[in-house]
Amino acid sequence: MATKDVVTKVWIDPGCIVCDACETTAPDVFDVTDDTCLIRPDALNPDFTKPRTQDIIDAALECPVDVIKYDTAAVEVSDEEAAAATAPAEAKKVDAPDKKAPHAPAAKTPAEPAKAAATKSPEPVAAKSVEKDGTLDPAIAALLRAATARGGNAGIERQARDVPAAIAEMSRKDPKDLPPDARQALIVEAARKSKQDPSASRRQFISSAALATGWIALGTGTGVAAGPAFMRFMMPNVLEEPDPRVRVGKIQRYLEMNPGDVNEDFKPQGIWMVREEDRIAALNIICTHLGCIPNWLPNDRKFKCPCHGSGFKPDGINFEGPAPRPLERFRIFVEDGIVVVDKSRKFQHELGQWEQPASYIGV
Ligand code: FES
């Protein structure tokens, strides 16, 4: 008997940029909120994910930051089903009916105008850079779909009507009110370099190239479908990289805490400061199950995740619920008497990394 792989579990690693791409591809599995992406409760059941295997794999492939993870298991199937499952992925995509997010019900698929925007530009230097053998990168295609889906197809069609006027309006504006040429040049250059340098990160390439495509498409009048929603959606990925180092105050305030105490002052920055008998540490507030934000319950002396009930002790160790591992810790050090947390480097307890000196301040 032949077998095929089916998805038995899907989850989101930290780092979601809430682009909506996965929800557009598999709306009954992914729920993109303002801050993160959640797995819908039904999709925590293997019986629910198995028949949606292809959608989940497509969503993972399209994810621009590769945070969608899944487990698979082999199940026995008929020879015909096995042959269908091993057909080339691209062929499947061409044959598959268009998927629509529930909030984008109009007849035209979101991908159509977005793709047109990427391929119709005259001399599309950046657009060419996002194509591989004439095929738009699946991650970029998903971003374009998501960007357009945010406004809905009605919005897309309205933009299609209004863009000639919008372009005329742009041509009347003072140059200082337009996107700086330097910015556009930078973006195009980044897209070109990303293509030449295979070691460049996928996210850097996608955000730069897709943004360049969007600007060029708009400038030539062929970005009608993507429109302003596309630009609003794309810009932050390139222009706003928050500083990963957070200064969390004088060392003295943490020395004065009692062992087991938790300081929530920097939760908006994604950090819980915790005091242990012999050290001060900075916990990452992201739940290690599916990426929700737990709450600190001072009376119960624990962090409790509202999504699926995982519980963590004040030091971050998981002890109840589905979370598979402790909360992560950030690099932490003292600089001129000020405690600095470096969120670009994380330490995992299950890998023995909490014993590395950079993961704590000894007291
Ligand atoms: Fe599931 Fe936290 S995300 S328990």
Image (tube, rainbow, N blue to C red):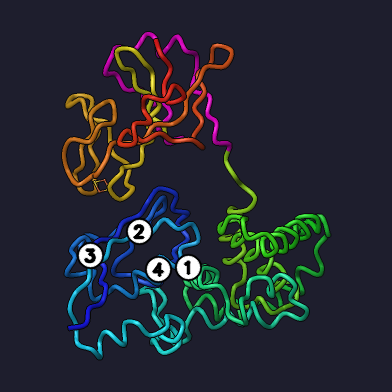
- Camera-side residue: 149 or 141? 141
Q: Quadrant of residue 10?
A: bottom left
How busy is the neighbourhood of tag 3: few (under 14 within 10 Å), some, or many (20 plus)? many
Badge 1: residue crowd in 10 Å (few <14, some 14–19, many ≥20): many
Disc 1 element: helix
Label 1–label 2 contact, CB within 8 A: no
Q: In terms of secondary structure, where does tag 4 sit?
A: helix
The dot on residue 69 is: 2
Dot 1 amino acid type: Arg
What's the residue at 36%, 27% (across, down)? 354
**Magenta part of the protein: which range?**
243-270
Front of the two marks 4 and 1: 4
Q: Residue 322 placed where, x, y %?
A: 19, 47
Numbered circle sitting on residue 8: 3
Rendered location of residue 50, percent (x, y): 22, 72
Q: Which mark is residue 244?
A: none
Q: Residue at x 34, y 74 (%)?
A: 55
Residue occupying the point 25% across, 87% down: 81
Would you name the residue on which mark 1 appears?
150
Residue 168 coordinates in the image, percent (x, y): 77, 74
Q: Amino acid at mark 3?
A: Thr
| Magenta stretch encompasses residue 260 | yes
On screen, residue 326 versus residue 96, left or right, reads left
Q: CA distance from mark 3 to mark 2?
A: 11 Å
Disc 1 or 2, which lies upstream in sequence?
A: 2
Is 238 contained in the magenta span?
no
Earlier-in-chain disc, 2 versus 4: 4
